[in-house]
Image: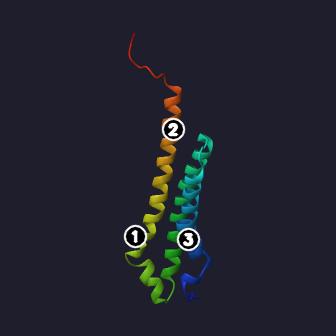
């Protein structure tokens, strides 16, 4: 049995939610916080990285569903250059998550290391 369109299925809208909405909400929340602990920053960074992994899994699943449809709109979205754009969104959110994680680790190492590194 062929599905009418992937664009009306729950998985596609979960993809939209996890690719666009949640990373923007996480980054907006980080920008609104004046002081943030390293633990919270690392948690948000790991959430962004995990969300990017989930996005890739959902994109490949929805793309495989799109192959089974007869819809022209599905072909235009999942068998064209729009697929590249769909894969760039998780890449960007994972990149932001990795940058946040490296910032937290760098700040931790600055606090732990001595300030004067010249030999005496």
Residue 43 image point, x, y percent: 61, 48
- The dot on residue 15 is 3
Residue 61 coordinates in the image, percent (x, y): 53, 71
Give the mark nearest the N terminus, 2 or 3.
Answer: 3
- The kind of secondary structure element at disc 1 is helix
Q: Characterize the local packing of mark 1: few (<14), some (14-19) or many (20 or more) Cα atoms within 10 angstroms.
A: few
Between disc 1 and disc 2, the foreground one is: 2
Relative to 7, is 96 above or below? above
Can you identify the residue that label 1 sits on?
A: 84
The residue at 58%/83% (across/down) is 8
Q: Nearer the viewer, mark 2 or mark 3?
A: 2
The answer to the question of whether label 3 and label 1 lie on touching residues, with beta carbons closer than 8 A, is no
The disc at residue 105 is: 2
- What residue is at 41 percent from the left and 75 percent from the top? 82
Q: Is residue 76 left or right of residue 100?
A: left
Does label 1 or label 2 sit earlier along the sequence? 1
Q: Is residue 116 left or right of residue 22?
A: left
3D distance between C-alphas at marks 2 and 3: 30 Å
């Amino acid at each position: 049995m062929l599905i009418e369109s992937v664009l009306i299925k729950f998985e596609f809208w979960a993809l939209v939610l996890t690719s666009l909405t949640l990373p923007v909400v996480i980054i907006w929340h980080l920008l609104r916080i004046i002081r943030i602990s390293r633990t919270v920053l690392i948690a948000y960074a790991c959430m962004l990285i995990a969300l990017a992994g989930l996005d890739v899994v959902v994109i490949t699943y929805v793309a495989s569903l799109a192959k089974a449809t007869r819809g022209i709109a599905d072909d235009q979205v999942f068998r064209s250059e729009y697929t590249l754009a769909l894969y760039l969104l998780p890449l960007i959110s994972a990149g932001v998550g990795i940058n946040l994680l490296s910032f937290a680790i760098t700040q931790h190492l600055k606090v732990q290391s001595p300030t004067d590194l010249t030999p005496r």
